[in-house]
Amino acid sequence: MFLQLGELLWVERTLAFEALPKLIDDVRDEELKAALQEHLEQTRYHAARVEEAFRALGGEPTSARSAELDGALKQHDEQQVTEPTLRDLFHAFGAARTEHLELGLYDALLALVGGDASQLLARNRGEEEDALGKLQTIAERLRTELPS
């Protein structure tokens, strides 16, 4: 359980302090930029709540690198998309992909923990689900705006 929690902590920290700021800088669409900025702020709280969940379970917050997130970020960074609307759509789908990864981690942990830790993780999971919904809505709009 602590290994999965550590992986989740690493994911939240990596997104909050590396991936999301980089993505926000590269996005042109204002709605997508605003949604990513809002989620960046939430993600910083997510990391803090995961640390609290560690303590609630009697552990010390320790992160464990996520090979799955590493692979997704590497694959995303290797793509060369130059058309602005298509690039924003690509970023929206990349962000949605990480939300799915996070939701899977939260679901697994919520099946294992209870008490205060469960409440902290459930709050994060709900915000991740909301973020995913916004990203999917924005991605659909961007898809319809692609040149024919």
Image (cartoon, rainbow, N blue to C red):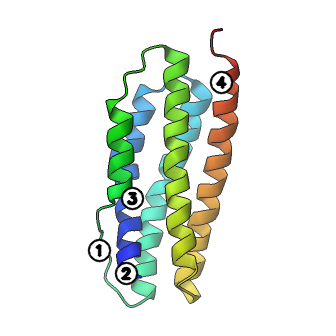
Q: Amino acid at mark 4?
A: Arg
Tell me how far mark 3 sits from mark 1, CA to CA.
12 Å
132, above or below 51, in the image: above
**Local secondary structure at mark 3:** helix
Residue under the image location 58 percent in, 26 percent down:
30
Q: Please state if 12 lies on the left or on the right of 139 as rendered.
A: left
Return the mark for residue 81.
none
Name the foreground residue: 55 vs 103. Answer: 103
111, above or below 124, in the image: below
Q: State which mark lies toward you, 4 or 1.
A: 4
Q: Mark 4 and 3 residues: CB-CB less than 8 Å, in contact?
A: no
Tell me how far mark 2 sits from mark 3, CA to CA.
14 Å
Residue 51 in picture, x, y percent from top left:
40, 74
Q: Mark 4 and 1 residues: CB-CB less than 8 Å, in contact?
A: no
Return the mark for residue 62.
1
Residue 57 figure quarter: bottom left
Residue 52 figure quarter: bottom left
Residue 115 in picture, x, y percent from top left:
58, 89
133, above or below 120, in the image: above
Write down the residue under mark 4.
143
Tell me how far mark 4 sits from mark 3, CA to CA.
28 Å
Return the mark for residue 11.
3
Label 2 packing within 10 angstroms: few (<14), some (14-19), many (20+) = some
Label 3 packing within 10 angstroms: few (<14), some (14-19), many (20+) = many
Instruction: Give whichever of discs 4 and 3 has the lower sequence position.
Output: 3
Q: Amino acid at mark 2?
A: Phe
Label 1 packing within 10 angstroms: few (<14), some (14-19), many (20+) = some
Tell me how far mark 2 sits from mark 4, CA to CA.
40 Å
Write down the residue under mark 2.
2
